[in-house]
Image (cartoon, rainbow, N blue to C red):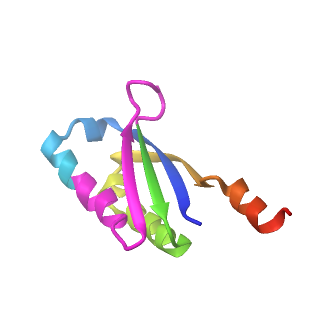
């Protein structure tokens, strides 16, 4: 089963003070690089126009929980979090249709 993780993020004023070019570079080096391992996929969503506390949502799909764990360790060390541009507010791990997989394996 593929593990899908939602990271709820909040941009801090220091992020908004950067130019868009600087933001793109840091994003690519942080989220892009940490989620580029084989079996990992990243999707990114803007939420600031719809939510007061959460400005961004990263959705990570990982075929291997170890790869996901290593990606989060690298993300914590990246400029995005380590330099305080973003706060990681919540991490929600999930399995898409997990109940169906369970039922197929355990329910007659």
At horizontal 21% and vertical 36% (from top left) the residue drawn is 17
The answer to whether residue 64 of the structure is visible from this angle is: yes
Name the quarter where the C terminus is drawn. bottom right
Name the quarter where the N terminus is drawn. bottom right
Reply yes or no: does residue 91 show up in magenta: no
Is 39 or 13 nearer to us in this picture? 39
In the rendered view, does 48 fall on the left or right side of 19? right
State the extent of the magenta-drawn residues as a range: 26-55
At horizontal 13% and vertical 45% (from top left) the residue drawn is 21
At horizontal 52% and vertical 75% (from top left) the residue drawn is 66
The answer to whether residue 11 of the structure is visible from this angle is: no
In the rendered view, does 104 fall on the left or right side of 57? right
Reply yes or no: does residue 37 show up in magenta: yes
Is 6 or 80 nearer to us in this picture? 6
Residue that protrudes farthest toward the right in the picture: 108
Is 71 or 11 nearer to us in this picture? 71
């Amino acid at each position: 089963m593929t593990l899908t993780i939602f990271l709820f993020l909040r941009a801090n004023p220091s992020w908004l003070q950067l130019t868009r070019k600087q933001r793109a570079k840091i994003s690519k080096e942080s989220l892009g690089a940490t989620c580029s391992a084989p079996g990992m996929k990243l999707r990114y969503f803007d939420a600031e126009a719809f939510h007061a506390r959460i400005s961004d949502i990263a959705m990570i799909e990982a075929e291997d929980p170890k790869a996901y764990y290593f990606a989060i360790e690298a993300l914590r060390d990246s400029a995005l979090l380590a330099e305080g541009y973003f706060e990681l507010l919540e991490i929600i791990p999930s399995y898409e249709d997990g109940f169906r997989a369970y039922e197929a394996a355990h329910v007659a």
